[in-house]
Every structure is written in C-alpha cells, then in structure tokens.
C-alpha cells in the first residue's frame, strides 16, 4: 500500500503548524526543522479542534496550545505538558517524508 501525499515539506513553516483536511478528518502537520509529525486536530480533553480560528495555532516556548482549554502539547510526540488533559497525548497519524513530500501511511 502506498503512502498518500499530504503536502510538500516546503509548504510547512520551519517551526510551526499547518492544518489540512483529509477526507472527513482535520489534521495538523507540526514541523521543527527537517522533522514533521502529523496529528488529528482534536484536543483529548473535550475532543474538539485545537484551534478556534482556521489555520491559527499558538506556539509558546515550542509548545502547541489548545485555545479552548489551554492545554499545552510537546513536540515531537504530542504529549500534553500541562492543562486539563495532562497525560493524554494528541492522536498521532503515521507519516513519513519521501522525496521532500509529507505522506500519510
């Protein structure tokens, strides 16, 4: 089974997050340099999107913040570093980089 393309690596900010639609699911690709992780855009606290405004994801000290509940998530694993969902990670989506392209497995 081949991996499904999500985006080009160059389409992602060097240190940031971008949102994508994949079927009925909302995903985020979180990049730090050459490393990218993909997660379902859903806070484990109340199972709602991490962002309020489309495409806007606050990063504070390298941590991604859920704008609804003020939980903070750590790169690269998506673990909750504080807030109401402490101990609950973001749902990871298997992905890899192939020829400069982020692909979903």
Image: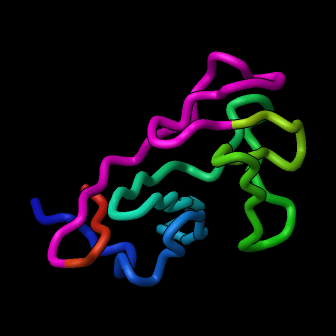
Highlighted range, magenta: 73-99
* Residue plotted at (77% across, 73% down): 54
| Residue at 86%, 38% in the rendered image | 70
Quick check: 48 above or below 31?
Answer: above
Q: Residue furthest top?
A: 87
| Image quarter (top left, top right, bottom left or bottom right) of the N terminus | bottom left
Q: Nearer the viewer, residue 20 or 35?
A: 35
Q: Residue furthest left?
A: 1
Res 28 visible: yes
Q: Position of residue 30 (x, y in %)?
A: 51, 58
Quarter location, residue 72: top right
Q: Quadrant of residue 35?
A: bottom left
Q: Is residue 105 above or below residue 102?
A: above
- Front residue of 48/13: it is 13
* Residue plotted at (76% across, 46% down): 65
Q: Is residue 17 left or right of residue 47?
A: left
Percent from the top left, x then y, of residue 92? 44, 41
Query: Magenta stretch: residue 49 in it?
Result: no
């Amino acid at each position: 089974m081949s991996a499904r393309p999500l985006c080009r690596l160059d389409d992602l900010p060097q240190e940031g997050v971008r949102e994508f639609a994949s079927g009925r699911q909302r995903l985020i690709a979180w990049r730090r340099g050459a490393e990218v992780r993909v997660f379902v855009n859903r806070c484990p606290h109340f199972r709602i999107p991490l962002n309020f405004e489309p495409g806007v994801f606050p990063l504070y000290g390298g941590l991604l913040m859920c704008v609804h509940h003020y939980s903070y998530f750590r790169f690269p694993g998506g673990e909750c570093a504080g807030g109401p969902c402490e101990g609950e990670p973001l749902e990871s989506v298997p992905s890899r980089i192939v020829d400069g392209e982020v692909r979903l497995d």
